[in-house]
Amino acid sequence: MNKENDDLLDISEKGRDKDGTIISSDKRLFVQFIAFSGNGEEEEVITSLRNFGLDGALYADINDPNGYGLAIMSSDPDYFLTELRGFLLNSPFDKYRQKGDLTMFGRTYSFGYESDLDQTLINGPRKKILDEMLKWVIWYPLRRSKGFEMLSEEEQRSILGEHGKIGFKFGKAGFATDIRLACHGLDKNDNDFVIGVLGKELYPLSAVIQAMRKTKQTALYLDSLGPFFIGKKIWQSEL
């Protein structure tokens, strides 16, 4: 066995195929959420997004009559500092004020058991954001307490499993689905995750978050949730 190879650090996303063999991928989808407020024309904003070819969705902000939320996707983080940066500085968005407390940035990740990593890391989250039926969304960051990281893997699995069962029930009933993004070191407030909860109607999204309050993870091992952006999709790119 090559000792040098043993010392190499592998930070790829892991999964397992049907026969249990470990598979890996270096592909990830980066998602940025930006909220704006201003007095521009909605159609002008939508036209600029369409002409630019942005991959993502635009939401009307339920708490701000002049507000919008924009979810942007790319597998290349450089995109956010090059093409996207140039677009936002030279488009109708330069008339809007960015809401810094609602700016979020994260990356997709795997749990280690998925058999289709492309679906988990790229295609699945993108399809959810661009699903025409999933009009309503709640985007928010969360930060776990440091005590959670000190628990054994078995304890962590149990706590996350309780949380996951609620999400599964809401998903199976067609009420809500979610997008989970890791943002360790990518968030100015030291949040750990960015969550998008999406659905056909708004009430079930509130209901699933309410149901999660009773889990051990939320009640005992979260330091913070929010702020929350609540919106309804008014434009999306082609799937």
Image (cartoon, grey):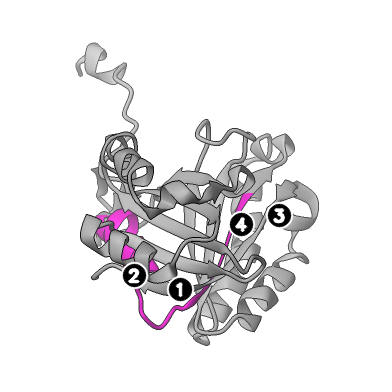
Instruction: Say whether marks 2 and 4 touch (CB < 8 Å).
Output: no
Q: What residue would you read off at disc 2? A: 236
Pick whichever, 31 or 90, lies toward us: 90
For disc 3, the marked residue is 217
23 and 230: which one is in front?
A: 230
- Label 2 Cα crowd, 10 Å radius (few <14 / some 14-19 / many 20+): many
Identity, as a three-letter code, of the amino acid under mark 3: Gln
For label 4, the residue is 160
Identify the residue shown where x is 61% and y is 75%. 205
Is the residue under label 1 in contact with that under label 2 (CB below 8 Å)? yes
Residue 235 image offset from top left, x and y in percent: 37, 72
Asked which quadrant contains residue 217, the reply is bottom right
- In the rendered structure, which disc, 2 or 4, sits on the residue that comes first in sequence? 4
Q: Is residue 183 visible?
A: yes
Q: Is residue 64 magenta?
A: no
Q: Sequence-wise, which precedes: disc 4 or disc 1?
A: 4
> Residue under circle 1?
233
